[in-house]
Amino acid sequence: MSSLHDSLVELIRRTSAEIPDDVHRALLASLENEKKNSLAANAIKIIDQNIALAKAKSQPLCQDTGSVLFYVDCPIGYDQIRFAQTAREAVTFATKKGYLRQNSVDSLTGKNDGTNCGPGAPAFHFHQVREPDAGVRLVLKGGGCENVGAQYSLPLEKLHANRDLDGCRKVILDAVLQAQGKGCGPGILGVCIGGDRATGYELSKTQFLRRLEDRNPNEELDGLEQDILKTANELGIGPMGFGGRTTLLGVKACAANRVPASFFVTVSYMCWAFRRQGVTLDAEGKILQWLY
């Protein structure tokens, strides 16, 4: 096996079994806001116990290991074909080892070949960079949280949402309200304002690559993120929909140019089992640094 294969298997293992430190800190901080011995507080305590067990046993944080999404920053001349082939082999190997559930089925036949590989699975997003080393970020996105993602087209009369930031605010909060804990909250939102239907979802998911404690460099988007987070946590939905003060752990938003005829607001939802990790790789594929 190559160094790249071994590195990607370890990236998959850690992503599946170990929650990122920034997310864990946010979960523990949220416990302080909940009423002692409430359903919300007990739910967060159980989540924390789950996190500890998964790490100790090197087993998935959640049985739904979800869609496998690779985000790869490629140096000039990087062999993307080799990377994709090696990543598919690593995903197959990791599935056999139990780091990933046999979770990918043929959409026409419903058959599952047990490899987690097939058309569109895993998914690859390659971006060229002027750096000597490759950066690989991995997101494992469960089906439950994927199901409560939403895309809105503004203006939307029933929510009195116009083509402005207030209209964006209204539909983003509507997405939280419609989820009602079904996405395994407390959740994290990735939002894209603008773009077309496809790029809206793609860019909304890239927001999950940001750390929870970072602040948006765009003042208007930063204000929107903080406002949505505060307001959502006042809705009383709470962890797993049990009620409480922690409905969201974070909100991350970006904006993309659009054509004048369209104004989409796309909301991707990530569950508490926020499986996101990354590495920097040298030319041979060995891990130089963990990114989260």
Image (tube, rainbow, N blue to C red):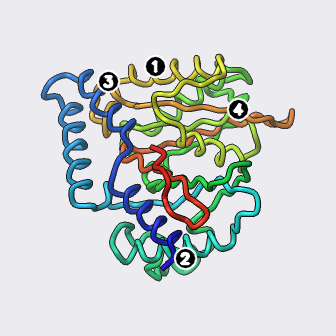
Q: Place residue 42 in its image quadrant.
A: top left
Instruction: Bin the neighbour count of mark 3 within 10 Å (Cα to Cα): few under 14, some 14-19, many 20 and up.
Output: many
x, y percent for residue 30: 30, 27
**Residue 242 position (above or below residue 287):** above
Q: Which mark is residue 231?
A: 1
Q: Amino acid at mark 4?
A: Ala
x, y percent for residue 71: 60, 54
Instruction: Bin the neighbour count of mark 2 within 10 Å (Cα to Cα): few under 14, some 14-19, many 20 and up.
Output: few
Secondary structure category for the residue under label 3: loop
Q: Amino acid at mark 1?
A: Thr
Secondary structure category for the residue under label 2: loop
What residue sits 44% from the left and 24% below the top?
A: 232
Q: Residue at label 3? A: 245
Left or right: residue 222 versus residue 91 is: right
Q: Earlier in the sequence, mark 2 or mark 3?
A: 2
Q: Earlier in the sequence, mark 1 or mark 2?
A: 2
Instruction: Bin the neighbour count of mark 4 within 10 Å (Cα to Cα): few under 14, some 14-19, many 20 and up.
Output: some
Question: Nearer the observer, disc 1 or disc 4?
Answer: 4
Instruction: Bin the neighbour count of mark 1 within 10 Å (Cα to Cα): few under 14, some 14-19, many 20 and up.
Output: some
Distance between the alpha carbons at the discs numbered 1 and 4: 21 Å
Q: Residue at label 4? A: 255
Q: Earlier in the sequence, mark 1 or mark 4?
A: 1
**Between residues 148 and 104, which one lies in front from this camera angle?**
104
Q: Place residue 33 in its image quadrant.
A: top left
Q: Which mark is residue 219?
A: none
Q: Residue at label 2? A: 106
**Between residues 81 and 166, which one lies in front from this camera angle?**
81
